[in-house]
Amino acid sequence: MESWKNFKLDEEGMWPKTGLVNLDAAHNDDRGSIQSLVNFPMKNISLISSKKGVVRSNHYHLTDWHYMYVLSGSFNYYYRATNSDDELQCVHVEAGELIFTPPMEDHATVFLEDCELLAMSRNPRDQEAYEEDVRRVILVDPENITL
């Protein structure tokens, strides 16, 4: 039997068309609410904690995509198509928002305050699988950030 890590779960036409993703309406009743984040096949959900002033990512993925849902805090998300001369774009992402990163998109996150987020990805996130798929770039130099 082939490893579950090698099964492809989706096609590009199924992905969100924009980075910041509109959430479906929450289900609310007298018990509280249920907010659906991602109704989509994936292989990993990770909880990531980052400190104010930290730069993460500065890479792109060959095949992986991920959603990031902010539980608390905020960050600036910088991105552009891999191997392009496009101007670097920036989206401010706050608690309660969801952003999508497709494969072959250079991206970096600059945390404006302490932050916790959920990252939900297409590929498994064991270190070996992750390193096979990621390529490092410098979009945001950690030595030159100002908050």
Image (cartoon, rainbow, N blue to C red):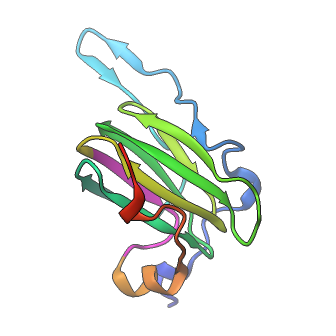
Q: Is residue 116 left or right of residue 27?
A: left
Up/down of 77 relative to 42, above or below: above
Is residue 90 one of those drawn in magenta? no
Q: Quadrant of the C terminus?
A: top left
| Main SS of residues in magenta | strand
The reply to whether residue 9 is visible in this rendering is yes
Q: Is residue 35 left or right of residue 31?
A: right
Q: Nearer the viewer, residue 50 or 65?
A: 50
User: Start and end of the magenta stretch?
Assistant: 116-125
> Where's residue 15, x and y in %?
67, 51
Q: Is residue 106 left or right of residue 99?
A: right
Which residue is rendered at x = 53% and y = 81% of the image? 133
Residue lying farthest to the bottom in this orientation: 1
Q: Is residue 84 left or right of residue 98?
A: right
> Where's residue 5, x and y in %?
48, 80
Q: Nearer the viewer, residue 71 or 3?
A: 71
Up/down of 5 relative to 41, above or below: below
